[in-house]
Amino acid sequence: MRFSLSAFTFILLSFSSSISATAVCLGEECSRIPNEFLLGANLIDPALDAVYTKDFLNAMGSSAVMQNVNSSMIGARHLSGQRAGLGYSLARTNLNPRNLFLENSELRELPSQGAAASPAVSYGANLGTLIGSPNSELMKWNVNFHIFHYYLSEGNLPFLRIKNTDIGGRVTNLGLNLRYFPLYEGSEEGKDTSYKNGLSFGFGIFQTNQQILLNSYDRRPTNIRIDGDARKWIGVNDLNYHSRILSSTLDVRYSYAFGDFSIYGGLGGMFHQGNITIQVVRNASISTVLNKEDFSTYPSLLHLDIHRNYFLTSRDWYGILGMEFRWRNVNLLAEYLKNRNSESLNLGVQYLF
């Protein structure tokens, strides 16, 4: 049996992203596969069209940002003291269904949404109270901070339903928000005016770090056509997705209160930029050219390693709708954010002190 080894690498550069790929074929069948066809026509092009679509990376990044922004649990009511809270937020971004790996492998269906989900721990305080100053202007400012770090599993990634796949990774979200209440006039006869209707303006800075690891295997051989010849292949796939995105927001909100219950709405602007990296590795056995069911006569292995860096820059407007219910020292909050393609829902509970 003749032994053949083919190895080749190529790099493509564009203004906003870089792509590199390495393909190695080991075995007798590799001598029957033209290098230029293997690299250009049959393997790399479908992978770039499917896995590394700009829409998918944008959707994942936008969902992560939207979810992190909504984790702040700032609401729209003035805070005269301090509070600690715990919440959970979800976000999704709609896009057309895409292939997650290669057309002819079983890591096939990417859901029609980029998605993100995370709990968060938050802390908020009145700026005047925090620094111990009775200055009336400082009392018009609230500061809010949230953070959470957790490890991923299939249980907390319900939007990724891929058969025969192990899921891992980690997520870290944090954010700082300043909120100004220009009409706040302090307390009247012991009653906090935060129960009244109010206008507020906010500015926030957020950092989102995500890493998603997927490992899957093909349950059965699938068809592949190489240089006009029908073959099959079967293998294992590894995907590593990593994003680090910095965001800033500006928004205006108005709250209308009914005693302990209030509803609010508003409009915000969002700008975010950061790096997104995705890497896919596939190791597969390919069948012979004479019999596409035969993997043993001339054992041949194909290794494909594709890596893409993408620099995400985006700006958008978003709408805000929420409600709060305050009972003694407990505040319940639900908030919904929506822009052109993304939406996020947050539910939280806060303790006031």
Image (cartoon, rainbow, N blue to C red):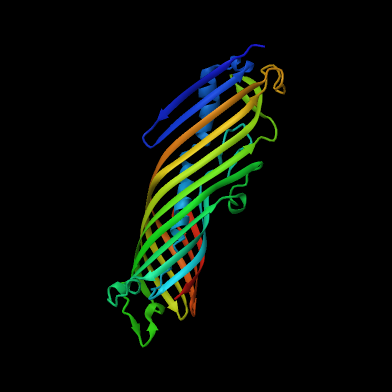
In the image, 122 versus 333, the foreground residue is 122
Measuring from the top left, give residue 203's x and y in whole percent. 34, 61
Relative to 331, does residue 206 appear above or below in the rendering? above
Q: In the picture, which quadrant includes the N terminus?
A: top right
Measuring from the top left, give residue 329's x and y in whole percent. 48, 78
Relative to 225, does residue 210 appear above or below in the rendering? below
For this orientation, the residue located farthest to the front is: 132
Q: How many marks?
A: 0
Q: Residue drawn at (40%, 65%), measured in percent from left and top?
A: 144
State whether residue 73 appears in this view.
no
Quarter of image, res 253: bottom left
Is 180 left, or right, of 339 in this rendering? Answer: left
Q: Residue drawn at (66%, 23%), measured in percent from left and top?
A: 231
For this orientation, the residue located farthest to the top is: 2
In the image, 168 versus 109, the foreground residue is 168
Q: In the picture, which quadrant includes the C terminus?
A: bottom left
Measuring from the top left, give residue 92's x and y in whole percent. 51, 52
Relative to 127, does residue 245 appear above or below in the rendering? above
For this orientation, the residue located farthest to the bottom is: 189
State whether residue 160 appears in this view.
yes
Q: Residue drawn at (63%, 42%), measured in percent from left and top?
A: 165
Is 29 left, or right, of 125 in this rendering? Answer: right
Relative to 188, does residue 280 appear above or below in the rendering? above
Q: Residue drawn at (38%, 52%), measured in percent from left and top?
A: 247
Is 274 left, or right, of 160 in this rendering? Answer: left
Measuring from the top left, give residue 199's x and y in whole percent. 35, 71
